[in-house]
Image (tube, grey):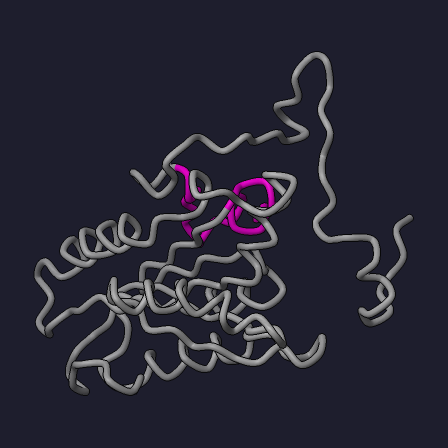
Amino acid sequence: MVPGLAGGPDVRRVLLVWDAPNLDMGLGAILGGRPTAAYRPRFDALGRWLLARTAELSVGSPTRVEAEATVFTNIAPGTADVVRPWVEALRNVGYAVFAKPKIDEDSDVDSDMLAHIEMRRRGAGLAGIMVASADGQAFREPLEEIAATGVPVQVLGFREHASWAVTSDILEFIDLEDIPSVFREPLPRVSLESLPDEGAWLQPFRPLSALLTSRPAQGVA
């Protein structure tokens, strides 16, 4: 059980898991750089949406159903003072935050998110789950297994980066921009399916210099 989080073993959860490193990268790719205040997700609006969804799923339930909002993030060396206000704001809204030092390329939080999801499946179980991520390699199979048991599963993210969820026959995909008030301004989105006649630049997902520090990867054909 998450420390400090209310609830007992007979409470089923509607669980939101937010993959901050993955979504930050996706949002940065859409914007072509770090987001300004107008383009940062509003977690209070997302929380209200989660509570409304929880109310829907609790109708007719024989057990108590509660919402649980969680954010998983990495903290790179030297960034604690910069990230602290964001983490504290999340906690003030009602989100639990799992923060992990970013020591190397293997310090991601995928395994921690999957472990938390599995823990919530035990006991009274899940009444619903929403995973905000485009990481199909980490989440597709586990989420499809959960959906196959009859638990409502939704993947939240950006349609440009989550085709595995958009095209799934068993998972429901919701674009974050379609959730009311999550973004103050419309995102400047360009995709290969909606290019303007004059063409458009598609920004890199990460700087080229990352090749000097990342693990060897499969080359681009």
Q: Nearer the viewer, residue 208 or 83?
A: 83
* Numbered-mark total: 0
**In the image, is residue 161 part of the stretch drawn in magenta?**
yes
At 43% across and 61% down in the image, what residue appears?
131
**In the image, is residue 37 part of the stretch drawn in magenta?**
no
Question: Splitting the image into 4 quarters, where does residue 188 fall?
Answer: top right
- Part of the protein shown in magenta: 158-177
Question: Splitting the image into 4 quarters, where does residue 58 fall?
Answer: bottom left
At 11% across and 66% down in the image, what residue appears?
61
At 29% across and 38% down in the image, what residue appears?
180
Locate residue 198 relative to residue 176 in the image: left or right. Answer: right
Locate residue 153 relative to residue 193 in the image: left or right. Answer: left
**x, y (%) of residue 96?**
33, 73
**x, y (%) of residue 183?**
38, 40
Q: Nearer the viewer, residue 145 or 106?
A: 106
**x, y (%) of residue 4?**
24, 84
Q: Nearer the viewer, residue 128 or 104?
A: 104
Relative to 115, say whether 45 is above or below. above
Relative to 15, say whether 118 is above or below. below
Relative to 152, say whether 2 is above or below. below
**x, y (%) of residue 103?**
67, 81
In the rendered image, which quarter contains the N terminus?
bottom left
Residue that sits furthest to the front in the current view: 81
At 30% across and 39% down in the image, what residue appears?
181
